[in-house]
Amino acid sequence: MRFELEGRIIFSKDVSEETQKDIIEVLENGDIFLKGVPEGKENEASKIEGYEFEGKDLKLNMTSGTYTRAHEGIVRLKKPIMEKVGRKHQIGIRDVAIDTYVVTITATPSKVAELKGLKVPECEVELDGEKIKILFKNLGDGELKRNIIDRAIKFVKTELDKQEQDLTFEVCKIAPGTIVSDYKATREITFDKDPTELAEPYGWVKRFPGRGQWFYTAPMAKLFRAFESLIVEECIEKVGFDECLFPKLIPLDVMYKMRYLEGLPEGMYYVCPPKREPEMFRDFVNEMMIKKEIPIDKLKTLLRDPGYVLAPAQCEPFYTFFDHELVDVDSPSKFFDKSGWTYRWEGGGAKGLDRVNEFLRGECVWMGSPEFVETVRDDTLKYAEKLAEKLDLEYWTEVGDDPFYLEGRKNEDRGIEFPDVPKYEMRLWLPHVKDERKGVAVTSANIHGTHFVEGFGIKDYKDRKVWTGCTGYGLSRWLIGFLAQYGYNYEDWPEIIQKKVGKLPEIPKLITWP
């Protein structure tokens, strides 16, 4: 894909010549766009082809390939520019505007021709031989935050790949996206602010240097633990799960057996163990101390090949526990884990408190007969819905379009048994999103059929059918859905939450923050 952008960074006042000089230093630092770009793919990152200052505007012409795409690149410029000129020149950034943006996707002429007449909301589509051009005009910061560009690209690529749709669409007997239940709050929901935008000024969170990570201060941590306790009591224990402690550092071989590496290899953090060679690391430390920077290239030579990932699904150890074991479906297993973080690399998709790279979940995993597995899945979802209704949280449950074990996969050659509906997803309404009815996914209830049973060689001792299932209760997202509908005023919260939280702790008292 190729991305061509004409846009503007709009400042709070006219940009003086002195300010321009400092901004130009930032613009000429191409390394800004290389963070997260794989080695050898540097030519795919954003490039500034031209720029011009006019009054309050910095006009930019940018291009890119598929890494640090141009619309991500222009947003990425904001932070280093403000660090360079904000305090020094007493100037701020008011907005980022994209005047025109052309995304070009190449495909065979026959596939391009099949898209004739395709309409995509909020953009235009032009077809030309082997090229599909998606044209955007007059996009502001709001449209960028709503991921309009990424959604349009995904929509076009889905249409292009209809003959090779994800297995989900082939397997599922009910169309993904179908709403199967919903609940309207009995009270009037008056809070309509984005909880992320208020959390930091209130001192409940602080940005962490890593992408998609936050430091949660005492009030937010107290609310986390309150929801964790509620979900365990109201959902997990009522279905009879036993708590275990799952490892979070998962060998690559486990991910291979799960076929996760086929579907979403770009969505994980890979871990490289170091070589046990103290003398070589001494050279690394000496160079770092002299140069006052981390010698990344030298560090790479001291690391072994990737051998692990940080747990992206949390249920991985469950299947490993039963690897090549004989089980009895009359004595089914139900485990749950809430012992630590889950990690997924969202790349440019990480935003706010609801789409993060590091998050907390209560993960339930079970194994038994197909009938047992389906009943447990239904129960885990039913109690989540009951909890939302007890808290008077507006929600809906829909058929999911991205079961984690099928996501990104196009075919299955093992004769696997799949359920009629692999995934249900429960969403809490986000009132602050005005132009569409959007919800944050708080509970994901999945059945895998024999997918993992086959992958890990698990058998019933009487050769009966064995299925597995898992339900994830996203603690981070339950909090965001709750705060989106109730806000941060303790007195407005339902009594059940107030009792669980008790007295809210004070935020850290610093001179410069929040």
Image (tube, helix red, strand yellow):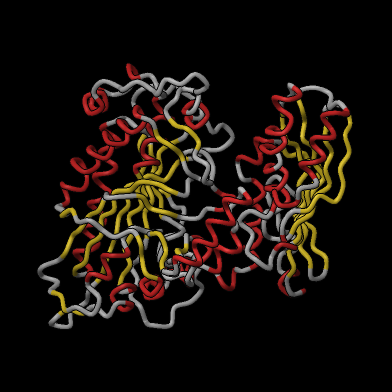
The correct choice, above or below, for 291 with respect to 259 in the image is above
Question: Residue 302: x and y, percent?
Answer: 51, 67
The correct choice, above or below, for 219 with respect to 314 in the image is above
Q: Which of 481 and 122 is in front in this view?
A: 481
Q: Nearer the viewer, residue 322 or 439?
A: 322
Q: Nearer the viewer, residue 514 or 186?
A: 514
The quarter holding residue 204 reads: top left
The correct choice, above or below, for 416 with respect to 473 in the image is below
Question: Residue 299: x and y, percent?
Answer: 55, 62
Q: Residue at x 69, y 48 (%)?
A: 32
Q: In this view, does 440 lie to the left or right of 100?
A: left
Question: Residue 10: x and y, percent?
Answer: 77, 31
Q: In this view, does 288 lie to the left or right of 341?
A: right
Q: Is residue 365 left or right of residue 130?
A: left
Question: Residue 507: x and y, percent?
Answer: 38, 23
> Looking at this rendering, what residue extends furthest in the left direction?
331
Residue 185 visible at all: no
Q: Residue at x 73, y 25 (%)?
A: 88
The quarter holding residue 378 reads: bottom left
> Looking at this rendering, what residue extends furthest in the top direction?
491
Q: Which of 462 and 253 is in front in this view?
A: 253
Q: Residue at x 63, y 51 (%)?
A: 291
Residue 468 visible at all: yes
